[in-house]
């Protein structure tokens, strides 16, 4: 068994004033209550809130305070993230740092997928964040919307990441979808997922810890919460060798795949359909985007040579053949065929209207013949 204790801190985040001192105060309380904690993770943009007007330079006083707190408590500290302005090009990145127990910033990570179009002014990072905790295991970091793109976790776990640290800021109605993605990510990539959301301007809470079998080890509600969890990295290694519950060995199956995915080659033409989608922009009132009455088959590129062949590049729609005309109805359908008696002429029966049926009286009986049902 390789145990390691990680604590998430779900706290109220102010949008218009710094939260740094509040974070450090909560860290002090956490360590007083649970001194066995070895790593602490806060939510996305916890330090200064979600407004990029409070962006800071790469070296700033807040980071120095966090470094001192890590040394004080002897813990690995990931203080969520904050907006950082690149001094060279002036672009703003949503950036997280990893601080070791000696107070050193060993990694910086800029969010790869800002929540566009709503975070249109935030630049996207391009470098992955992987680091080792000596004698424990390999950890990776992604931020919020990154996890909606499984390629990010695929890259991390292909490099051996066993624990995915995932600070988020979700205050919207899609939080439940994110919880489903967190569980799916843990199962797909056979790793722990530590998902920490904030409150107030920092989100709606519902932080969670998921193990490699997709089991939720902890689920926060909508109030402040500190949740230290001891994980076992041997569980990750065992599962990756023998499969989840002795079943799917997904990382090895991906390694031994017999196909490469042309969609990742931007020149392949496989993603032609994506180019038919509209621009990445915030919807406006009364928008009819996506509700074009034109047949979808007419809006998708059509190439006759690949129609109906999904294994070839491109997306084609094959028009099904028309149904044949229905036959005319048989005029004698449902009509009894009369039996011809060659020895006698049978007069047609007189047309008798349906008799009135009294309740409880069988048809064709006298008034004295009744039935009790």
Image: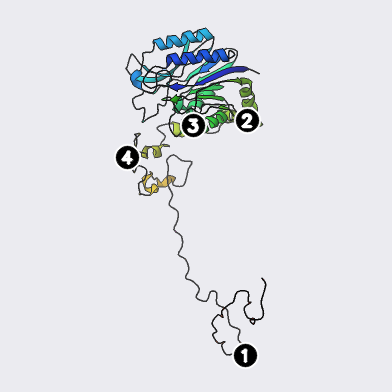
**Category of crowding for the residue at label 4, using alpha-carbon neighbours closer than 10 angstroms: few (below 14), some (14–19), many (at least 20):** few
Q: Name the dominant secondary structure of the magenta segment.
A: loop
Q: Which residues are magenta?
A: 316-322
Residue drawn at 39 percent across, 48 percent down: 297
Indicate whether 111 appears above or below 295: above
Q: Quadrant of residue 369?
A: bottom right
Element type at marker 3? helix
Q: Earlier in the sequence, mark 4 or mark 1?
A: 4
* Distance between mark 4 and mark 1 Cα atoms: 83 Å
* Left or right relative to 102: residue 285: left
The residue beneath circle 2 is: 244
Is residue 230 shown to the viewer in this render?
yes
Image quadrant for the C terminus? bottom right
Residue 286 in the image: above or below residue 258:
below
| Residue marked by disc 3 | 178
CA neighbours of label 3 inside 10 A, class few (<14), some (14 to 19), many (20+):
some
Between the residue at mark 2 and the residue at mark 1, the CA separation in whole angstroms equals 82 Å
Taking the spot 51% from the left edge, 11% from the top edge, the residue there is 100
Residue under label 1, please give it: 342
User: Closer to the N terminus: mark 4 or mark 3?
Assistant: 3
Q: Which mark is residue 285?
A: 4
Tell me which numbered mark, 2 or 3, is placed earlier along the sequence.
3
Q: Residues within 10 Å of mark 2 (few under 14, many from 20)?
A: many
């Amino acid at each position: 068994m390789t145990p390691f204790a990680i604590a998430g801190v779900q706290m109220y985040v102010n949008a218009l004033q710094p939260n740094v001192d509040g974070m450090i105060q909560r860290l002090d309380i956490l360590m007083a209550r649970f001194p066995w904690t070895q790593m602490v993770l806060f939510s996305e943009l916890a330090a200064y809130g979600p407004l990029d007007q409070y962006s800071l330079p790469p070296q700033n006083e807040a980071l120095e305070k966090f470094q001192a707190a890590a040394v004080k408590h002897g813990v690995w500290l990931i203080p969520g993230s904050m907006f950082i302005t690149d001094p060279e090009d002036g672009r703003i990145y949503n950036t997280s740092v990893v601080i070791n127990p000696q107070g050193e910033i060993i990694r910086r990570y800029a969010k790869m997928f800002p929540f566009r179009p709503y975070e249109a002014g935030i630049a996207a990072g391009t470098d992955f964040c992987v680091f080792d905790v000596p004698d424990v295991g390999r950890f990776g970091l992604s931020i919020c919307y990154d996890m909606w793109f499984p390629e990010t976790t695929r890259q991390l776990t292909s490099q051996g990441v066993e624990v995915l640290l995932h600070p988020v800021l979700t205050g919207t109605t899609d939080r439940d979808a994110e919880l489903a993605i967190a569980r799916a990510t843990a199962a797909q990539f056979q790793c722990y997922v530590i998902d920490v959301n904030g409150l107030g301007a920092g989100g709606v809470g519902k932080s969670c810890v998921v193990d490699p079998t997709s089991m939720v080890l902890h689920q926060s509600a909508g109030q402040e919460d500190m949740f230290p969890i001891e994980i076992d990295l041997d569980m990750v290694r065992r599962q990756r060798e023998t499969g989840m519950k002795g079943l799917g060995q997904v990382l090895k199956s991906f390694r031994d795949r017999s196909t490469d995915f042309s969609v990742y080659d931007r020149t392949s033409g496989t993603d032609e359909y994506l180019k038919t989608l509209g621009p990445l922009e915030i919807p406006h009132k009364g928008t009819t985007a996506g509700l074009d009455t034109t047949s979808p088959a007419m809006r998708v590129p059509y190439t006759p040579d690949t129609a109906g062949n999904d294994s070839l590049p491109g997306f084609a729609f094959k028009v099904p053949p028309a149904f044949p005309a229905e036959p005319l109805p048989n005029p004698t359908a449902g009509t009894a065929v009369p039996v011809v008696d060659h020895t006698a002429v049978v007069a047609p029966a007189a047309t008798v209207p349906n008799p009135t049926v009294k309740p409880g009286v069988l048809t064709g009986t006298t008034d004295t013949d009744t039935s009790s049902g």
